[in-house]
């Protein structure tokens, strides 16, 4: 597999690094602190795309002949966006609200070069079983999911015992819709199998 230009991943997420490595793509990581605020009037999909695009714009001055990749994953219960929990109580309340129902995970992705910007998103519906107080407490205490939107990681213990089914891409819930990313890189002419 050949990339037409060097790829930069603007993310510290070990899950995104792992997924990109699994695609067989060479990349470097370049990370800056970027505020994750967004306009209140944006709808769910717009929030994910806005955040990915906003992150990418902060790197524009650093780009030479690179392909920059940014992504942002949000968890939505109805129209409410569940961000990263600040503490145990917020994490507990989020998981209690997700228990016994379904929610939507949306990852916005931005591909940026000096002369092109491509933004897209993927959506996955996730169904949780009814979670007990003990299960929620055990997960938060042992896994401390304070860096995760919606207070959980699908690849962690809570995902293994609590998620009944999903509709859509599993990898999107992990943090990067790799199938759509692959297709977009090919369609933009940045990636070939030569």
Image: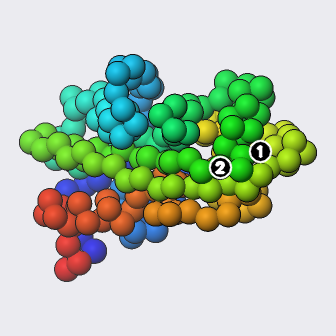
Determine crowd level at label 2: few under 14, some 14-19, many 20+ residues with C-alpha closer than 10 A: few
Asked which secondary structure carries label 2, the reply is: loop
Query: Which numbered disc, 2 or 1, marks the residue that appears first in the sequence?
Result: 2
Q: Residue furthest bottom?
A: 194
Q: Is residue 52 left or right of residue 82?
A: left
- Residue at point 67%, 43% (across, down): 98
Q: Which residue is identified by label 2?
A: 101
Q: Is residue 167 above or below residue 44?
A: below
Q: Which residue is identified by label 1?
A: 143
Query: Where's the C terminus, which quadrant?
Result: bottom left
Q: Is residue 100 visible?
A: yes
Q: Is residue 25 visible?
A: no
Q: Residue 87: percent from the left, percent from the top?
A: 73, 25
- Rendering quarter of residue 70: top left
Q: Is residue 45 left or right of residue 1?
A: right
Asked which secondary structure carries label 1, the reply is: helix
- Residue at point 60%, 51% (across, down): 102
- Residue at point 47%, 56% (across, down): 124
Q: How far apart, in angstroms, are the residues tagged by discs 2 and 1?
A: 22 Å
Q: Residue 38: percent from the left, percent from the top?
A: 38, 23
- The number of numbered discs placed on residues in the rendered structure image is 2
- Residue at point 77%, 52% (across, down): 130
Determine crowd level at label 1: few under 14, some 14-19, many 20+ residues with C-alpha closer than 10 A: some
* Closer to viewer: mark 2 or mark 1: 2
């Amino acid at each position: 597999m050949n990339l037409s230009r060097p790829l930069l991943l603007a993310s510290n997420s070990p899950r995104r690094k792992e997924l990109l490595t699994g695609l067989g793509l060479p990349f470097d990581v370049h990370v800056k602190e970027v505020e994750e605020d967004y306009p209140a009037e944006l709808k769910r999909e717009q929030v994910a795309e806005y955040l990915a695009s906003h992150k990418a714009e902060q790197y524009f001055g650093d780009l030479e002949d690179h392909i920059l990749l940014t992504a942002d994953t949000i968890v939505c219960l109805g129209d409410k966006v569940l961000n990263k929990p600040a503490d145990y109580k917020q994490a507990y309340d989020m998981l209690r609200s997700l228990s016994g129902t379904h929610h939507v995970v949306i990852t916005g992705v931005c591909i940026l070069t000096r002369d092109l910007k491509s933004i897209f998103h993927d959506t996955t519906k996730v169904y949780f079983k009814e979670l007990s107080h003990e299960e929620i407490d055990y997960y938060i205490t042992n896994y401390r999911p304070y860096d995760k939107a919606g207070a959980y990681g699908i690849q962690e213990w809570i995902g293994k015992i609590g998620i009944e089914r999903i509709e859509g891409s599993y990898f999107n819930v992990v943090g990067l819709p790799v199938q759509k990313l692959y297709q977009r890189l090919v369609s933009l002419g940045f990636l070939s199998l030569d």
